[in-house]
Image (cartoon, helix red, strand yellow):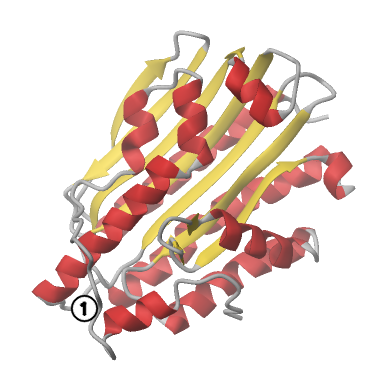
């Protein structure tokens, strides 16, 4: 049986691998690391990269925390137990070039006791301009990982991502989705916890080669001031989702998490334009038309 200590150790290794790959991809910027401890128990490694040739701001965070669940979290999880353990890796990358997409990944494990535990996570892509070829490639990469472990995963988790990464007050998706899942365990899937853990790790390891391919395709493309302004507007929508709807942000704040690590997902700069209207027939209008649920990208 897989232990929580082994899961945390594997996730820490995945953090190392991804940081190395992103430093190589950028070519100039390096991660700064901060080791922190949580007052209620546990801690983590926050790693931030900034001002790179490609990566304007990004974070690859690892945490392994334990303690007592607040009443609000117990209610939202529908559990009575108080003692918890949680570990995971969380990533958000904001690029300089508006033709390179934002990417997010999270893989995590949560445990209350020997009988109550689960895995969660996912990867989603937020292009400033939707490139349909990139969208097909991205979703095919995720489907390939899902299909190796469970034939039902991709369609189920793709729909879950469409529903989860939805900015309800805007009536639009955050990006082109990806896969998202939560509370996966033997009872829900029929798979062993070891097999679900293997899926979680493989999904985590698909992050670096997938994002590298997307970056390499567009990193040298020139862009206009209009495209840069649009990028800042789209970043504003990203911020809105993370602060209003994201459950990971809420969990971190409710459990007295480290605020700098929780909010590392926010870009260094974003804009809000009053009543912005994209010009009809523009690339901006095309992107807005594709920010909706249910698109079959494969």
Mark 1 highlights which residue? 221
Q: Is residue 6 visible?
A: no
Residue 279 placement (x, y as % from top left): 23, 84
Report which quarter residue 221 is drawn in.
bottom left
Q: Is residue 200 above or below residue 271?
A: above
Farthest-out residue, bottom: 281
Report which quarter residue 75 is drawn in.
top right
Q: Give whichever of 108, 294 is nearer the camera.
A: 294
Q: Is residue 212 visible?
A: yes
Q: Is residue 155 above or below residue 245?
A: below
Residue 101 placement (x, y as % from top left): 35, 65
Relative to residue 200, is residue 131 drawn left or right?
A: left
- Judged from the image, the secondary structure of the residue bearing numbered disc 1 is loop
Residue 235 placement (x, y as % from top left): 28, 57
What residue sits 57% from the left and 71% below the top?
139
Q: Is residue 157 above or below residue 253?
A: below
Quadrant containing the C terminus is bottom right
Q: Is residue 226 above or below residue 25?
A: below
What residue sits 40% from the left and 45% below the top?
242
Relative to residue 85, is residue 89 drawn left or right?
A: left
Residue 18 placement (x, y as % from top left): 44, 47
Q: Give whichever of 133, 73 is nearer the camera.
A: 73
């Amino acid at each position: 049986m897989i232990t929580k200590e082994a899961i945390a150790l594997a996730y820490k290794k995945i953090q190392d691998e991804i940081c190395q790959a992103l430093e190589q991809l950028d070519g100039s910027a390096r991660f700064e690391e901060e080791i922190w401890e949580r007052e209620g128990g546990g801690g983590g490694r926050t790693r931030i990269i900034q001002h790179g040739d490609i990566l304007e701001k990004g974070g690859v965070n690892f945490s392994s925390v334990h303690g007592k669940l607040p009443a609000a979290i117990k209610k939202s999880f529908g559990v009575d137990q108080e003692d918890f353990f949680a570990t995971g890796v969380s990533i958000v990358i904001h690029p300089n070039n508006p033709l390179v997409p934002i990417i997010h990944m999270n893989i995590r494990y949560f445990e209350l006791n020997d009988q109550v535990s689960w895995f969660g996570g996912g990867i989603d892509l937020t292009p400033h301009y939707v490139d349909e070829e990139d969208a097909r490639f991205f979703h095919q990469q995720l489907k390939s990982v899902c299909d190796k472990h469970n034939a039902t995963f991709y369609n189920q988790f793709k729909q879950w991502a469409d529903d989860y990464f939805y900015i309800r007050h805007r009536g639009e998706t955050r990006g082109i989705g990806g896969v998202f899942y939560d509370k996966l365990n033997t009872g829900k899937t029929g798979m062993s916890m070891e097999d679900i853990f293997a899926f979680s790790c493989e999904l985590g390891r698909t992050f670096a080669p997938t994002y590298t391919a997307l970056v390499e395709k567009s990193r040298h493309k020139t862009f206009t001031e209009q495209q840069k302004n649009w990028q800042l507007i789209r970043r504003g929508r990203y911020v809105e989702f993370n602060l209003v709807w994201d459950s990971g942000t809420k969990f971190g704040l409710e459990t007295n998490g480290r605020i700098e690590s929780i909010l590392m997902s926010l870009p260094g700069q974003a804009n809000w334009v009053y009543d912005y209207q994209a010009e009809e027939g523009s690339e901006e209008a095309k992107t807005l038309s594709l920010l909706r649920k249910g698109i079959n990208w494969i």
